[in-house]
Image: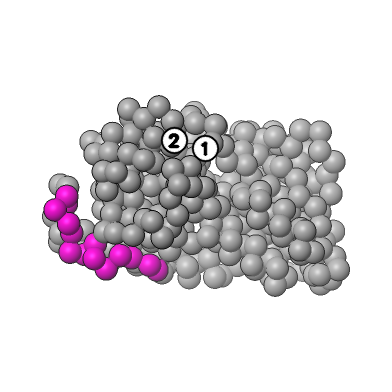
Amino acid sequence: MIFSVSWMFPPRRIGPAPLCLLVVALCLSALSARLASAQSATVQSATVQSAGVESIIVQSTTSTQNAGFYDHVVPHFTTETGIDVRVVAVGTGQALKNARNCDGDMLIVHSREAEEAFIAAGYGAVRHDLMYNDFIIVGPQDDPAGLRRAVDVREAMRRIERSRSRFASRGDESGTHKKERALWATIDRTPEDLQGSWYLETGSGMGATLNFAVQSHSYALTDRATWLAFGNKHRHRILFESDPRLFNQYGIVTLSRTHCPQARHDAAGAFAAWLLSPDGQQRIASLTRKGEQLFIPNAGTQTAP
């Protein structure tokens, strides 16, 4: 994990949390990240697997798992087909690297440019839109940067930077981290420009980063589904939303038979086809938290793989 060492000796603008609490938050976030890393390193089954049952491995973004997506859809697919689905939930960047090494049978991620590059490089076969939601910026309810007054996401990012309000970044090449960098670019900022005690890279998944943001009184970019499913909001609130640039598309990518001849292509294709079918899309649409839909299916008229 990457943290700014100077942050442990806070600048003049320390905010309400005393230094001892911030150090505790740092330690707790590091522990959460280790646990999340250990969990992601182990292939996790979304259903109980029996001996001799055909199975596939999905390399996945963490946000879908955090939102309960696989627990919601996989049992229905397995009941219909007998195919077990196991999930490796990591950031999109790591998921693509794992799939490039043929450590899996298909991808569900959310960085279209990276997905298309993966296919262009010969690692993937076909990409399909699956569903979408949006990104939001959450932060402490007292909103020290004044994001509630921002008219668009460019102004929101500028307010965070100019006020030097603490911002928790994934810092892990995930789809969310790629989106964050794109948003900083709208105000002509690069990661190199964001040095200082206010910009904090966790190197962790979305859930661990949100925990860190809550405990350190920081802003964070997150997908809406993860936030809705997140149980430790405390006094953090959604402070900016509804800009078109916060659109968050998820895609399915199947692997190249040439590059990964040992992958379970037929079974993976069956799962992709089911998710893209009316039954699968309806099941995705029925996933809610407190009455709010987590993902909007948008496979449309695409031809299933």
Mark 2 secondary-structure assignment: helix
The residue to which callout 2 is attached is 153
- Image quarter where the N terminus lies is bottom left
> Residue 294: within the magenta?
no
In the shown orientation, is residue 64 left or right of residue 270? left
Q: Amino acid at mark 1?
A: Leu
Q: Amino acid at mark 2?
A: Val
Residue at screen point 43% across, 37% down = 154
In the rendered view, tell whether residue 253 sits above or below residue 131: below
Q: Earlier in the sequence, mark 2 or mark 1?
A: 2
Q: Are marks 2 and 1 in contact (CB under 8 Å)?
A: yes
The residue to which callout 1 is attached is 246
Q: Position of residue 205 (x, y in %)?
A: 46, 58
Identify which residue, 291 or 111, lies in the foreground: 111
Residue at screen point 62% across, 50% down = 111
Stretch of the chain drawn in magenta: 1-14
In the rendered view, tell whether residue 89 sits above or below residue 247: below
Q: Position of residue 252 (x, y in %)?
A: 71, 50
